Structure formats: structure tokens, C-alpha cells
Amino acid sequence: MDLGVQIGSLRMRNPVMVASGTFGYGPEYAELVDLSRLGAIVVKGIAMEPTRGNPIDRTFETASGLMNAIGLPNPGFQGFVETYMPFLRGVDVPVIANIWGRTVEEYEAVAEAFDGVDGVHGLELNVSCPNIKEGSAMFGTCLETFRRVVEGVRARTLLPLIPKLAPNVSDIRVFARAAEEAGADAISLINSVPALAIEIESRTPRLANVTGGLTGPAIKPIAVKLVWEAASAVSIPVIGMGGILSADDAIEFIIAGASAVAVGTASFVNPNAAVEVIEGIESYFRRHDLKRIGDLSGTLKT
């Protein structure tokens, strides 16, 4: 059985990564999780310059989900490289940097800066975060700007490039094809779903940002459907995410057409969730006498 996944020059030993924004930069979970078991570590979103993020309250738990409006706080490119890369270089797992900006030029600058960083194996292009008032989400929902930023970043890096798609578009297949045509090596989806929660006694939003992104089990059926549609439109690998708590959840995404998956909110509930998902996938493959991810990916019977 070989569950390896290839994304450009990036080779994952298994199809399970941890989603950006839910696993810190790696060291935060090092005493709780055997990091060497992971397919890849996707670090928190990084911009060229340090960012403070949104005011509190930043999170609110809902039925079967979590709303957040963290706002992508980060130490900036230089701060990340100096503070976290020494640790990450010592972990025998591919590292994918999630990058973002408020303009096309900012995306290009941070991508170009990462191109020469030893120990970074790929870039996830965050063009779909709903919690930034400038840029980011705009790039994920306007096809013209989405294409511009993917093309701009592609021209400035040789690293495997993985645009992260927004769920709130009229046709996910159009954006998936645009990413492939612009030179992406894979796509990941979905990002969180824009949402609003209200405290009824005060009639005020639960989040200081007013709206936020909904993640967790509540969004899984939406995510599986969008992964199925996106995978039908492209030939590059699709990384599925959104509400994965167990191996069964991950296997749904793979059957829908994903080549890999990312575990996100589940890590807040169970830090070892990603490793348990890996073990469950291995058990499923043995039970069904499957040898490779390609034996299962895209096998939905309709």
C-alpha cells in the first residue's frame, strides 16, 4: 500500500495535512502530536509584514461548528522565517506556507520571498479568507482578480502553488479551471463559509468583526459537493477540507475526487485528529484491498 501524493515537486507520504490557521506554525502541537506521521504541515497565513489581526471577540462556537474572525495575525515573512523555520527544518514533513496579501503586489512579494527559503516545500495561496476587510476574500470571489493573483504569484515562484478556493461563488468549476490555466499545481477547498451570529438580548454580533467564517462539521456536506464539482473540472490534484473529524469524513472527500485532505477545526477538539484520520484511511484501504489513493479518488457512483 502506497498512500503517497505528489503535488508538483512536493511529495507527501500520505494524503492528510493539517489546515492553515488550525495548527499554529507547528511547534504549538509538537508535544501533543507525532508530527512525522503527517502528510504535510500547512502553517498559519503569512503576509510580507506583521499583522495584528481583528479585535476580540474572535471566535464563537455554533451548533456543529465554529465561527471565527481571527483576521490572520502573523509575524510577517521575516519573523516567521527567523522564529519558526529552525524548528520546521527539523521535522521530516513537507511544510506548506499559506500566504496572503491586500494587493496583487503583496501576494507576489511574499511568494517571491519564500521561493528561496530552505525547508518550505509549497505555497498555499489564501485568496478566500472572509475575515479581512481589504483584499483576500475579494481575490477569491472575483474571477478576474483571482486569475491575476494566481498568474502573478506563479511568475515569481518555482514552488508548488496551491490556490485555496472560496465556497461563496456561483460556479466553483470556473475558479478551479482558472487556477489550473494560471499555472497552479493543485487547488485546495473549501475555505470557511461567511456567516453571522447574533446575541439576541443585546442585539449585537457575537464577533467583533460582525461576520466571520464558519468551519467544522456543519459545512462538510457543502465542502464535499464543491470538491466533487471542482475535481470534475480539472486534472490537477484537489485537496479537500471542511468539517473533517474522522477517517470516514476524509474518505468521503477522496471518493468525491480529492487526492488529499486537510484536517482543521477538529484539531482544536482533538489535537491528534489528523493522525487518527491517517490511521483510519490506512485501515479502510486494507479492508477494501486498495493500494493507492488513485484507486479511490473520484470513484463516486452516480
Image (tube, rainbow, N blue to C red):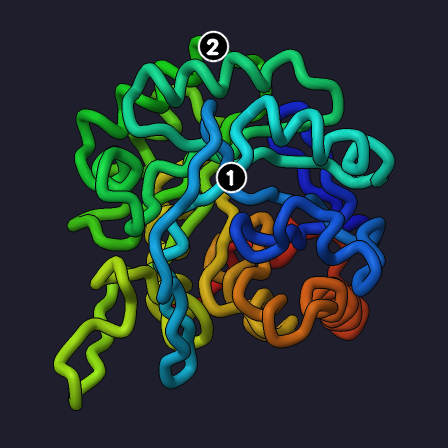
Judged left or right of residue 208, residue 247 is right
Q: Bin the neighbour count of mark 1 within 10 Å (Cα to Cα): few under 14, some 14-19, many 20 and up.
A: many
Instruction: Between label 2 and label 1, give the one nearer the viewer.
Output: 1
Determine the secondary structure under disc 1: loop
Judged left or right of residue 192, residue 271 is right
Q: How far apart are labels 2 and 1 at the CA level?
A: 22 Å
Could you tell me which residue is drawn at 13 percent across and 81 percent down?
Answer: 203
Residue farthest toward the left in the current orientation of the protein: 203
Mark 2, residue position: 156
Where residue 131 sits: x, y (%)? 30, 50
Mark 1, residue position: 74
Compared with 285, 231 (above or below) is: above
Q: Is residue 108 visible?
A: yes
Question: Could you tell me the amino acid type at mark 2?
Answer: Arg
Compared with 110, 245 (above or below) is: below
Q: Which mark is residue 18?
A: none
Quarter the C terminus occupies: bottom left
Residue farthest toward the bottom in the current orientation of the protein: 201
